[in-house]
Amino acid sequence: MAEMSWAAGTQCVAKGDHRKPKPGELAYHKGDILTIIETSTKKGFYKAKHNSSGEEGLINSTNVREREALRVDPSLSLMPWFHGKISGPDAVCKLQPAEDGLFLVRESIRHPGDYVLCVAVSGKVIHYRVIYQDNKLTIDNTQYFYNLIDMIEFYSKNKGSIATTLLKPKQKHGAKSAEVELSKTGWLLDISKLTLGENIGEGEFGAVYEGEYMGQKVAVKTIKCDVTAQAFLQETTVMTKLQHKNLVRLLGVILHKGLHIVTELMTKGNLANFVRTRGRSVINSVQLLHFSLDVCEGMEYLESKKLVHRDLAARNVLVSDDNVAKVSDFGLTKLDSKVSDNVKLPVKWTAPEALKKEKFSTKSDVWSYGVLLWEIFSYGRQPYPKMSLSEVKEKVEGGYRMEAPEDCPPAVYSLMRICWEQEPRRRPTFHKLREKLERETGKLNPDLGSEGREGIRCGSGC
């Protein structure tokens, strides 16, 4: 068998425990995530960093496996046992032979909006009506659940008021269990190792909490609605492929009473609030340029992967403890596409062709980036001040463009203007934008050496 060869930055999953390391070796437990730093002079060993503890040491390549990216696969399901609108007799056919604990869930045909849990026991199939009321689900008016995932999890461990615990899901033809795939590829995290802290944000789809996972501070996006959770599973599969210093890093996923997406914690919140609350007295133009460059580099990386963000705005850029801006919220991210999703579009940030014909591309992201630059250099003001959404649509289509924010360097404003070219093909690439921004940073800081960008982050006031 050929010897493993991994590049620096490769993430690995420990196949077993290594609790008594020799001097210079790294201790870890089964399932821990380790990042390769470099190859070692010792054959078959790598120098690695423990993702949770931050400790470094040698690991034996035979004790770990590479953490794979998930394939973007529409058949990947959080609810592989959900069969949609099928009849009772169809459900009985699917649950043959009727071994105890074999089950599926279907939509109720007789009671639209409700569900039916079908369970095999003693050679028969019992149908339990699942009533949907007050945004919760119940079978017996005693036990209530937020969603089907929550319900199945409960009855898999407790018999409750049904005839038997749920032992074996009957998967819908073509569906793949997300739990199995996430576990196989090393992205499924253990709920028992997560401690949830305070609520740090409320989104349209769920709450975001600060937390700790195996000693590492994390952010946890919780999505209870099972339909929404299924949609966000696609976001997660995209995130497993992406590793860049200016993209918020996915640590993994927890499946417990819905979906929990666990990412690195960005302690200083979103970029719009960050610049708005600190203002000109704390943050100067050079520091604003650093944030602009950070976002541009993250977007250049997405561009290289042929991925389109579709919701780029300062609210979706987060700031780390060491003042690095990272692009987040890939909820709408997908391969360069012209497909409509009936999504409510953020009008003030969306390119004209995307608003009118739903043509999304890297070039429509470039338009949004121009608006984001305006947000940064206006210190977090709302774009198109005092204009209604319908006015923005009409005026932008007619050629109107925002004026430069106060004290904005002329070269930066000219970048905004080229991002807002009506014709998408006339807009620059993120690669070109990065080159121009780097030149501008150099002009404002001629005395800075190659370390200048990292050396001039915000001072203590940030």
Image (cartoon, helix red, strand yellow):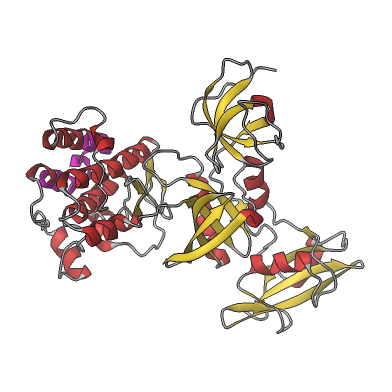
To which quarter of the image does residue 405 belong?
Answer: bottom left
- Residue drawn at (26%, 36%) of the image: 455
Residue 199 in the figure: left or right of residue 293: right
Residue 266 in the figure: left or right of residue 43: left
Q: Give the residue at the far front of this rendering.
A: 23
Q: Decide which of 7, 136 is in the foreground and name it.
A: 7
**Residue 184 placed where, x, y %?**
66, 42
**Residue 134 placed where, x, y %?**
57, 83
Magenta region, main secondary structure: helix
Residue 163 in the figure: left or right of residue 333: right
Q: Decide which of 117, 425 is in the foreground and name it.
A: 117
- Residue drawn at (29%, 48%) of the image: 365
In reply to whether residue 416 is colored magenta, the answer given is: yes
The N terminus - image quarter: top right
To which quarter of the image does residue 145 belong?
Answer: bottom right
Q: Decide which of 116, 293 is in the foreground and name it.
A: 293
In reply to whether residue 367 is colored magenta, the answer given is: no
Q: Is residue 429 visible?
A: no
**Residue 222 placed where, x, y %?**
52, 62
Which range of residues does the magenta coloring cover? 413-434
